[in-house]
């Protein structure tokens, strides 16, 4: 639960993002029956006006490389977490972050105090079983709460609207959803935006997880 507390109580580092230009990423047709993570993450058309995409959004290797140029420590930690997911069967992953201020591009998943931001992460696994085990173990440190030990704002299971393997965290400044659908695990983090925007983000991604 420490990651939830850190989102609320710790001001993540602020620094200038490289620039506001759009990165070279776009959904790519998949040769497999399953979508590519780059096609499943939040796209520009999914977010409210006034939010600009951070450089590096797209394939996770690109994201981590760009982040390493501005915050090597954070990039190293997220790289370790991604490598853990790889050992659990993740075959591909992608991240997109959209922010109202470029300062939030350097913050973890765009979660900076007093800055509107939306981030999404999607990983495709080798099997549904591998995806569910990875979701249960936690994604980037966000693990589902144990049954019967829910904190205020936390909901687990079908009540989230995202299926049995899902949980959401809803507070005015930070809203988060993590769920498993098919062979995918998805994570959405929304800061300083309203509940309807948060729900629209998860609703945009969920049908793409085929």
Image: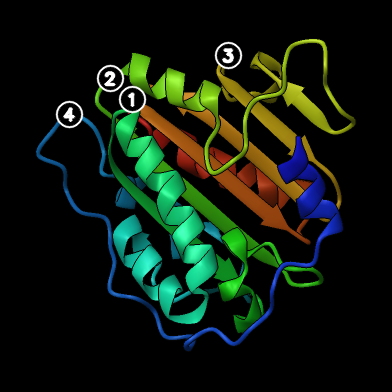
For disc 4, the marked residue is: 33
Secondary structure under tag 3 reads loop
- Closer to the N terminus: mark 4 or mark 1? 4
For disc 3, the marked residue is: 164
- Closer to the N terminus: mark 2 or mark 4? 4
> Residue 58: where, in percent of width, then height?
35, 61
> Residue 71: where, in percent of width, then height?
52, 75
3D distance between C-alphas at marks 3 and 1: 14 Å
Labelled disc at residue 127: 2
Secondary structure under tag 2 reads loop
158 left or right, relative to 61: right
Frontmost residue, 71 versus 123: 71
Callout 3: few (<14), some (14-19), or many (20+) C-alpha neighbours within 10 Å? some
Q: Closer to the observer: label 2 or label 3?
A: 2
**Quarter holding residue 133:** top left
Callout 4: few (<14), some (14-19), or many (20+) C-alpha neighbours within 10 Å? few
């Amino acid at each position: 639960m420490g990651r939830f507390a850190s989102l609320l109580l710790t001001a993540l580092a602020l620094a200038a993002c490289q620039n506001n230009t759009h990165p070279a990423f776009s959904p790519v047709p998949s040769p497999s029956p399953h979508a590519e993570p780059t096609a499943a993450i939040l796209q520009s058309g999914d977010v409210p006006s006034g939010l600009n995409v951070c450089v590096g959004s797209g394939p996770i290797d690109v994201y981590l490389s760009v982040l390493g140029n501005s915050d090597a420590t954070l990039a190293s930690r997220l790289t370790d977490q991604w490598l853990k997911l790889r050992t659990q069967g993740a075959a591909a992953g992608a991240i997109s972050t959209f922010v109202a201020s470029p300062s939030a591009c350097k913050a973890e998943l765009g979660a900076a105090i007093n800055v509107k931001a939306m981030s999404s992460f999607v990983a495709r696994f080798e099997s549904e079983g591998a995806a569910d085990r990875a979701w249960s173990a936690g994604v980037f440190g966000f693990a589902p709460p144990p049954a019967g030990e829910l904190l205020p704002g936390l909901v687990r299971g079908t009540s989230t609207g995202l299926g049995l393997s899902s949980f959401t965290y809803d507070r005015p400044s930070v809203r988060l959803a993590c769920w498993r659908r098919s062979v995918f695990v998805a994570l959405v983090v929304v800061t300083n935006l309203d509940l309807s925007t948060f729900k629209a983000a998860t609703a945009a991604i969920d049908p793409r997880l085929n």
